[in-house]
Amino acid sequence: MNSPGLSAAVFDTKPYDRIHLPAATGADVQLRFLSFRLTAETAAAALGDRAVCAFVNDTVDRDCLQQLSSQGTELLALRCTGFNHVDLAAARDYGITVTRVPTYSPNAVAEHAVALLLTLNRRIHRAFNRVRELNFSLQGLVGFDLNAKTAGIVGTGKIGRIVARILRGFGMVVVAYDPYPDAAWAAREGITYVDPFTLASLSDVISLHIPLTPETHHIIRRETIERMKPGVVLVNVSRGALIDTAALIDALKSGRLGGVALDVYEEEEGVFFEDLSGTVLQDDLLARMLTFPNVLITAHQAFLTHEALMDIARTTGANLRALAAGGSFVDGSVLT
Ligand code: NAI
């Protein structure tokens, strides 16, 4: 017999989060939307909830999971793909099932990466501000043709493949690196797999589409930047800590990098997703990054399309319903 339903604490929610999830969970799941992030300190807010729903900048460490477990939490449903912010071993120890959204519109993220690249290269961000000030000068707005240039795609999973295909559409030569290459896909798309150093030395544009793991932490650092073509444009919509920000700033100051487009930042927690206008920015590295004319930063919005939000709500809602009804979780979504 099915259990009677459940309540779920949904941490770190913004108004756009509150639109799709209620429709996807149905009447059996009572959602309690909380605007603050989940940490060991705030976990007590989920008292009485069998399920907890968390997002990318929640800190779901061992202490947090212990607290949740002591309150009877059975399911941690992540409404994101990445799970580097969750201590999965601790979740196993405390018997908490962790689910994620294994896939949601990869097009949303891929298209944002390309939007950043085009904006940065053609200086649209600067042109937009100038024209609004009635400054119609073109000085300093020279970009380069993408056609016939080389793009290096690091990680050819769901998102990297779409970026690769879009850039092929611009007439770019695309090279890629992935420890698990798919030769048939590459042959079909006219893409060549190379080793990371060759990718670094050939590419005019490098775009990262890999998860954050101990192996990929600071994959972009002083030594790897030195291997890159001078003037390379770097795009990162994956995870901030793939890049050593201090090394990036040095390379920007010296003119070694042509430009940097970021949707993620290693210290984004507590900054991205928040309206901090009118406050004093405490992060000196981020403040320095924001001063470069050839740096473009968005605040982790690559996923923010209606289609992606609906996909996220569907998977998360289905997992919450499964817990309420004693059914099975969405295929491929269970981490522990
Ligand atoms: P995926 O799992 O489909 O693909 C990841 C690929 O990276 C795999 O092919 C894997 O073999 C490869 N890989 C792993 N380690 C590597 C390494 N050291 N070098 C090169 N390749 C490596 O993941 P998907 O869906 O393409 O997402 C990629 C990343 O994008 C996610 O891990 C997440 O961090 C990020 N993301 C960012 C979002 C945003 O809003 N900014 C939204 C969604 C995902």
Image (cartoon, rainbow, N blue to C red):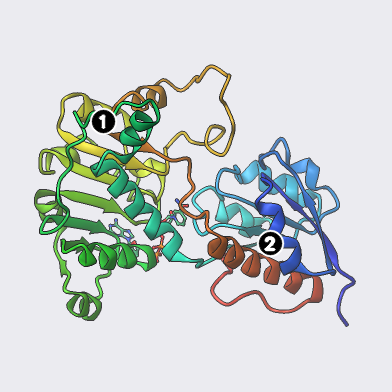
Q: Quadrant of residue 72?
A: bottom right
Q: Quadrant of residue 7?
A: bottom right
Q: Amino acid at mark 1?
A: Ala
Q: Amino acid at mark 2?
A: His
Query: Earlier along the polypeptide chain: callout 2 or callout 1?
Result: 2
226 w.r.t. 149: above or below: above
Give how far across and how far down residue 107 sits, in percent. 42, 65
Q: Is residue 96 visible?
A: no
Give how far across and how far down residue 153 sits, in percent. 24, 58
State yes or no: Cβ of the residue under disc 2 lies below 8 Å from any atom of ligand 1.
Answer: no
Instruction: State the separation of the CA atoms marked 2 and 1.
Output: 40 Å
- In the image, taking residue 213 as reference, residue 76 lies left or right, namely right
Mark 2 Cα-neighbour bin, 10 Å: few <14, some 14–19, many ≥20: some
Q: Residue at x 23, y 67 (%)?
A: 169
Give how far across and how far down residue 328 sits, in percent. 68, 78
The residue tagged 1 is 247
- In the image, taking residue 207 as reference, residue 320 lies left or right, namely right
For the N terminus, the image quarter is bottom right
Q: Residue at x 17, y 54 (%)?
A: 146
Q: Residue at x 36, y 36 (%)?
A: 128
Q: Is residue 312 visible?
A: yes
Q: Are marks 2 and 1 in contact (CB under 8 Å)?
A: no
- Helix, strand or loop under label 2: helix
244 w.r.t. 118: above or below: above
Give how far across and how far down residue 2 sits, in percent. 86, 79
State yes or no: Cβ of the residue under disc 1 lies below 8 Å from any atom of ligand 1.
Answer: no
For the C terminus, the image quarter is bottom right
Q: Nearer the viewer, residue 66 or 33?
A: 33
The residue tagged 2 is 20
Q: Quadrant of ligand 1?
A: bottom left
- Helix, strand or loop under label 1: helix
- In the image, taking residue 294 as reference, residue 7 lies left or right, namely right
